[in-house]
């Protein structure tokens, strides 16, 4: 008896890879934001589509590099659109989408969870809903508290309506590590104001630590109960802040273009503190960044490349990446076969991942500097500073952004985009394991 032919199962349509979906989501948000900022209601007549697209890209990637004056070139509606783009980009586009679906009572399927995992830089699908709620709660509390405190500065100067708006805008910009300010000189007019120098850094440090760390601090309330990630983030952040504070003060204390031009020691210390923490991808400044010594600029570039924490509003290669690299280096010279820190061990795959992330990051920055310098021969340090600031999604500038041509701006936009989305995409592919089918004999390579 002849058996009936068995039909082959149709191929399963797996759809687009989650990293690609995430990249398209961010690009679509940038394009829509550019259209909104380009509309006549959003600006005073001095913003073309190219400027609007650059501004939208800088906001969605929470960078802060600007080619227009946010306070004068954008109307109140334009500033509100910019604040919304900053909020969406800083807290994560997929996090907002999942929150909206949950609020409407709609189920969150596996495809959405996969993209959300990439947006939050997580390894597993478990606990994503808890992380989203933590993100939104922490952001709401911090931004409301920041706006309330900042209103004591802006309301007496600008009145209730405008003062409250300035407080809200700068609170959103600070917590999301965006660096957009409503003044052409950023926050230089408040270089010695204690409220500004405490509140703004507190916001972007909390945002840069990462929502997991903040939630862990609230739950544990004890150093011993903190997770290894939280311990590494807190230790690394404190060390980098103290290093930057002492280094900036020592290098710029007598520079008349920066600290040397301030009236007293207290003002210099406040400014040193602010400039030590703002490279953690915050982007605000209280001194003339273009007036810094070359040595200070190089130190700032190093801090910008490191950035903040994973699952945060900050960019860069991340503090934990730097720490694992240092631990691996020390272990190599000590001939240790395992990495240990705070009573926990780290696997070889962790070291390989941070090496790959660091290599790709340095490659992107160097290629970006090369491409920009092709059409701009002068001020190499300024161009390098700009490219590093773009990749770290920092926003600090030595004044080169406004001088770039169309090609240079396109390169900066691409670097900002890769700085915000690239590490997440790379992390997805690094998390994909495969076993080799063929084993080859070991070979000798002479390194170093």
Image: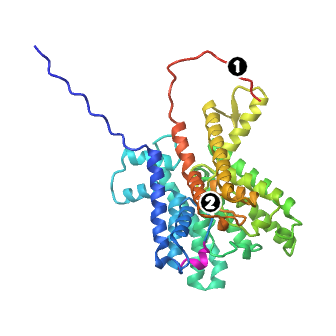
The stretch of residues the image draws in magenta is 68-75
Q: Which residue is rendered at x = 82% and y = 71% of the image?
A: 267
Q: Picture quarter containing residue 379? A: bottom right
Q: Is residue 304 left or right of residue 127?
A: right
Compared to residue 360, the image places residue 38 above or below, namely below
Q: Residue furthest left?
A: 1
Residue 226 position (above or below residue 25): above
The residue to which callout 2 is attached is 408
Residue 176 makes an appearance in the image: no
Q: Which residue is mark 1?
A: 444
Picture coordinates of residue 364 (x, y %)? Answer: 63, 47
Place of residue 298 in the rendered image (x, y in percent of width and height, measured from the top left): 78, 54
Closer to us: 402 or 199:
402
- Residue at position x 46%, y 42% in the image: 126
Category of crowding for the residue at label 2, using alpha-carbon neighbours closer than 10 angstroms: few (below 14), some (14–19), many (at least 20): many
For this orientation, the residue located farthest to the bottom is 159
State the SS at label 1. loop
């Amino acid at each position: 008896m002849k058996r009936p032919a068995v039909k082959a199962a149709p191929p399963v349509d797996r759809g687009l890879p989650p990293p690609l979906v995430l990249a398209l989501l961010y690009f679509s948000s940038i394009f829509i934001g550019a259209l909104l900022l380009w509309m006549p209601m959003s600006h005073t007549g001095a913003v073309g589509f190219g400027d609007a697209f650059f501004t939208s890209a800088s906001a969605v990637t929470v960078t802060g590099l600007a080619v227009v004056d946010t306070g004068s070139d954008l109307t109140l509606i334009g500033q509100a659109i910019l604040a919304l783009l900053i909020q969406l980009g800083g807290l994560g586009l997929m996090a907002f989408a999942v929150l909206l679906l949950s609020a409407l009572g709609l189920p969150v399927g596996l495809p959405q969870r996969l993209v959300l995992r990439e947006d939050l830089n997580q390894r597993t699908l478990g606990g994503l809903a808890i992380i989203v709620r933590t993100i939104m709660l922490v952001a709401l509390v911090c931004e409301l508290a920041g706006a309330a405190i900042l209103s004591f500065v802006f309301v007496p100067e600008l009145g209730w309506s405008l003062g409250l708006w300035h407080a809200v805008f700068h609170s959103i910009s600070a917590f999301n590590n965006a660096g957009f300010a409503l003044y052409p000189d950023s926050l230089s007019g408040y270089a010695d104001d204690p409220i500004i120098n405490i509140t703004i850094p507190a916001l972007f440090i909390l945002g840069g630590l990462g929502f997991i760390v903040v939630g862990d601090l609230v739950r544990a309330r004890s150093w011993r109960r903190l997770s290894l990630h939280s311990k590494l983030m807190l230790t690394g952040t404190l060390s980098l802040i103290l290093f930057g504070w002492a280094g900036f003060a020592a290098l710029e204390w007598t520079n008349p273009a920066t600290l040397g031009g301030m009236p007293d020691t207290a003002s210099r210390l406040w400014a040193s503190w602010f400039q030590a923490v703002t490279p953690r991808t915050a982007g605000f400044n209280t001194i003339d960044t273009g007036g810094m010594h070359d040595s200070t600029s190089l130190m700032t570039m190093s801090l910008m490349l490191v950035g903040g924490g994973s699952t945060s509003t900050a960019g860069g290669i991340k503090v934990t990446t730097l720490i694992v690299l240092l631990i691996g280096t020390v272990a190599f010279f000590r001939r240790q076969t395992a990495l240990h820190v705070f009573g926990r061990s780290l696997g070889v795959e962790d070291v390989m991942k941070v090496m790959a992330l660091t290599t790709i990051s340095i490659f992107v920055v160097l290629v970006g500097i090369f491409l920009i310098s092709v059409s701009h021969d002068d001020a190499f340090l300024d161009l390098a500073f700009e490219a590093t600031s773009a990749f770290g999604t920092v926003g600090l500038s030595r004044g080169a952004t406004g001088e770039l041509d169309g090609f240079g701006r396109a390169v900066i936009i691409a670097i900002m985009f890769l700085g915000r989305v690239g590490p997440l995409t790379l992390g997805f592919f690094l998390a994909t394991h495969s076993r080799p089918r063929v084993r080859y004999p070991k070979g000798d390579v002479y390194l170093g």
